[in-house]
Amino acid sequence: MFIRLTILIYFISLPLLYSHSNKKKSLKAHEHGVGVLNISQEGNTLLFEFEIPGFDIVGFEYEAKEKNDIDKVENALSILSDYKNMIMPSGSAECEEVKSNANVVNEGKHSEFISNYTFECKKISELKIIYIKYFNKFENSKKLNIKIFGKNKKSAYVISKSKKILGVKGHF
């Protein structure tokens, strides 16, 4: 089980590795208004990774070159860098953020924002709810495809802008 989780985390982390390199990353096809949230567990560690089309975050897909567009991207990265703008694990699990990262990946006429948040949880099995705050900050976002890879349970959900709470009881 540990090896499978390690491999899963490796593949989820690949976009980050490519966003820091000089090589271009081939962006997956995406639908405007629809973001992806992957949640994976390894022991008491939770990794949250968002992959969101540039249009949903800043209103355009091209690489920012004009000052106004660059300001929008920098503001978005600032918002994405703080997990409290995106998600909030319920207090019962006593989770503390240990690492976060936000990047934009540009390829041709497309861009994608990727943000990661790593938490250590003292009582991970008591995590029942994750508050989804992402929609509050990005008005072009309509849906979020969520995949959870927990020790006890794996699930996939699609939530819309109107849903603010994700039930995760029994996953960890």
Image (cartoon, rainbow, N blue to C red):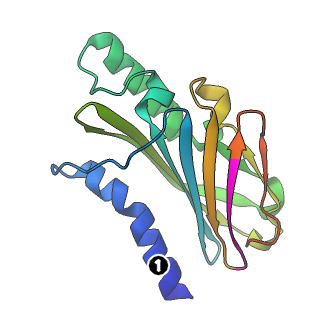
- Segment colored magenta: 152-158
Residue 114, how many percent across, how many down?
Answer: 43, 45
Residue 80, how many percent across, how many down?
Answer: 51, 37
Residue 125, how many percent across, how many down?
Answer: 79, 73
Total marks placed: 1
Seen at 23% across and 19% down, the residue is 65
Helix, strand or loop for disc 1: helix
Decide: is 113 above or below 16. above
- Residue 13, picture quadrant: bottom left
9 on left or right of 147? left
Seen at 77% across and 70% down, the residue is 123
Decide: is 16 above or below 53. below
Q: Quadrant of the N terminus?
A: bottom right
**Residue 154 lies in magenta, yes or no?**
yes
Please name whichever residue, 139 or 21, is drawn nearer the observer in this view of the structure: 139
152 on left or right of 54? right
Please name whichever residue, 161 or 44, is drawn nearer the observer in this view of the structure: 161
Q: Quadrant of the C terminus?
A: bottom right
Magenta stretch secondary structure, dominant:
strand
Seen at 30% across and 58% down, the residue is 17
Residue 3, how many percent across, how many down?
Answer: 48, 87
Residue bearing the label numbered 1: 6
Please name whichever residue, 62 or 137, is drawn nearer the observer in this view of the structure: 62
